[in-house]
Image (spheres, rainbow, N blue to C red):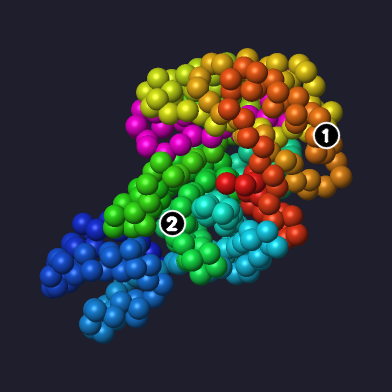
Amino acid sequence: MQTEKKDIRALTKEQLRDFFVTNGDKAFRGNQVYEWLWQKRAHKFEDMTNISKHTRDMLEANFVINHIKVDTMQRSSDGTVKNAVRLHDDLIVESVLIPTETRTTACVSSQVGCSLDCNFCATARLKRMRNLNPDEIYDQVAAIDNESRLYYDRPLSNIVFMGMGEPLMNYPNVMKAIEKITSPEGLGMSPKRITVSTSGVSKMIKKMADDEVKFKLAVSLHSAIEEIRNDIMPFTKSFPLNELREALEYWYKKTKSKVTYEYVVWKGINDDKKSIDALVKFCKYVPCKVNLIEYNPIDDGQFQQASQKAIEDYIFALERNDIVVKVRRSRGKDIDAACGQLANKEA
């Protein structure tokens, strides 16, 4: 029975060098192939034009490149681009390019479906099928970088992990992907231009702090009142606000990096004075800023966009307490709902 070929991008550079030495070639050949795989983003072995046909045939016989394919691409009238990305096993995830006048941001997925059960999120209705591999995360970013250059004549400037899935539930692969994305041998992007968004997995926030990561942290908070938060995000019963607070205090102590709170305001859920006061209090625990997000309804159910007055009440209370706040408008409204709930927001 024929064994399944291994994806060559699962190998480190050292393992590639060893492969060539074992097969009677020079170690530097591994460096060349590694460069083709990551920096030059080769989709096929035949793309590796400075490598002999004999060597390419040997690679073809031993390995595959499980590259993603952009299955369908939708462009919004506001410039937002949504990709439906087909993986090697025919599963689909989504990624989004979000342009502004000064930058382009990639919103990428980390899981097929999601492990969590946020009631307001379209992705949460999809069962988690599997974690994405580091190369599948990397490929989403590389594809959006290509689109940014094609449509906006500039390279990708920022990345947010706010697509399908909870990044901290796929921590090892997300970290490996970011390592490749930020490496000079990969895309060479600054980690300070990357934001990883979590729904509040406290123990993993502490692990990130211990690992001394250089990227930014965002937390999908949506309520600083335990009962409301548990109602809209049931899994948070396992990650109560006092634990989240402790983890964020630990994060700031170790990294000195501000936290961003992603916060959707919904009519009749968290648009009252009690919710506003609770958020202001929570924001005083660690240096932070707040992104108030315009909700993009996924149906006619309980989650409906709050009034403009409610948004203004939040802004007034936060600014009066010297807390930086921005309102993020929904993007790409004329195309299908983008990955995750937060993907449609401005970068």
Q: Residues within 10 Å of mark 2 (few under 14, many from 20)?
A: many
Which region of the structure is painted magenta? 204-233
The verdict on residue 205 being magenta is yes
In this picture, is 106 found above or below 21?
above
Residue 339, visible in the rendered structure: yes
Name the residue beneath numbered marker 1. 307
Q: Is residue 64 visible?
A: no
Q: Which mark is residue 138?
A: 2
Q: Residue at x 16, y 67 (%)?
A: 28
**2 lies above or below 278:** below
Q: Secondary structure at mark 2?
A: helix
Residue at left offset 42%, top offset 53%: 134
Q: Percent x, y for residue 79?
A: 64, 61
Real-space Cα separation, disc 2 to disc 1, in angstroms: 39 Å
Q: Where does the image place residue 228, in percent across and percent down from the top left?
A: 74, 24
Residue 217 or residue 1, whichever sits in front: 217
Q: Quadrant of residue 135?
A: bottom left
User: Which image quadrant: the N terminus?
Assistant: bottom left
Tell me if mark 1 has few (under 14), some (14-19) or many (20+) residues whose alpha carbon lies within 10 angstroms of its own.
few
Which quadrant would residue 151 be assigned to in this image?
Answer: bottom right
- Of all residues shown, which one is farthest toward the bottom? 53
Position of residue 242 measured from the top left corner of the image (x, y, whole percent): 57, 16
| Relative side of 102 to 209, left or right | right
Amino acid identity at mark 1: Ser
Q: In the image shown, does 15 or 62 lie closer to the viewer? A: 15
Q: Earlier in the sequence, mark 2 or mark 1?
A: 2
In-front residue for pair 309/292: 309
* Residue 339 within the segment the image draws in magenta: no
Write the residue at 34% across / 68% down.
40
Instruction: Give the image location of residue 144, x and y in percent.
Output: 51, 61
Is disc 2 in contact with disc 1, using a CB cutoff of under 8 Å?
A: no
Q: Secondary structure at mark 1?
A: loop
